[in-house]
Amino acid sequence: MDFASRPRRGADESRTRVEWIVEKINGRVPLMNVGSIRTPDDALKALQPGVPLIAIGRELIMEPDWVQKVTDNRLSDIQTVLTKQSQQALVVPDGLWNIILHTPGWFPFAEEAAEKQ
């Protein structure tokens, strides 16, 4: 699911799901926006509805220094794809690595990007 997805069936689609939820909970409980937050611009957009927290899990697995590199404006240094050899350098547990390898489209791989060109 995308962080900016709109409601389905019968709801006012002029706002995102998160905007509806923010209005409904009215600050009574914390809310985290998640889903396909890949870039710093995505992160800023995900925070705009007044959500105090966002999840950038996939990006942090590929680039553990993502937040620091964004803070330092070193965007071109951010690792955005994996290779079949990334597991050891990133210290990804075997179980998670196996799932990453066998879930097409979840993580971008350099080998796949090269094949598409």
Image: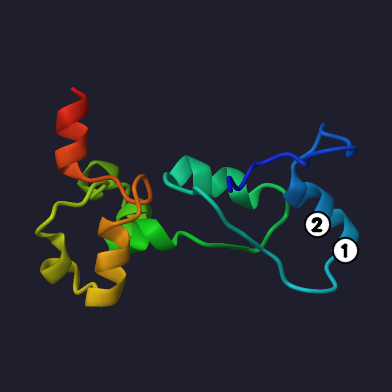
Q: Is residue 111 above or below residue 21?
A: above
The answer to the question of whether label 2 and label 1 lie on touching residues, with beta carbons closer than 8 A, is yes
At x 70%, y 66%, the residue is 31
Mark sitting on residue 22 = 2
**Foreground residue, 85 or 73?**
85
- Position of residue 70 in the picture relative to residue 56 (left or right): left
The image quadrant that residue 97 belongs to is bottom left
Residue designated by label 1: 26
**Foreground residue, 40 or 101?**
101
- Furthest-top residue in this view: 117
Q: Is residue 41 visible?
A: yes
Residue 91 percent coordinates (x, y): 19, 74
At x 25%, y 49%, the residue is 78
- Position of residue 1 in the picture relative to residue 5 (left or right): left
- Position of residue 93 in the picture relative to residue 5 (left or right): left
At x 23%, y 50%, the residue is 79
Q: Amino acid at mark 1?
A: Asn
Secondary structure of the residue carrying numbered label 2 = helix
Mark sitting on residue 13 = none
Residue 89 percent coordinates (x, y): 12, 68
Q: Is residue 31 above or below residue 76?
A: below
- Mark 1 surroundings within 10 Å by alpha-carbon count, few (fewer than 14), some (14 through 19), many (20 or more): few
- Mark 2 surroundings within 10 Å by alpha-carbon count, few (fewer than 14), some (14 through 19), many (20 or more): some
Residue 47 percent coordinates (x, y): 62, 52
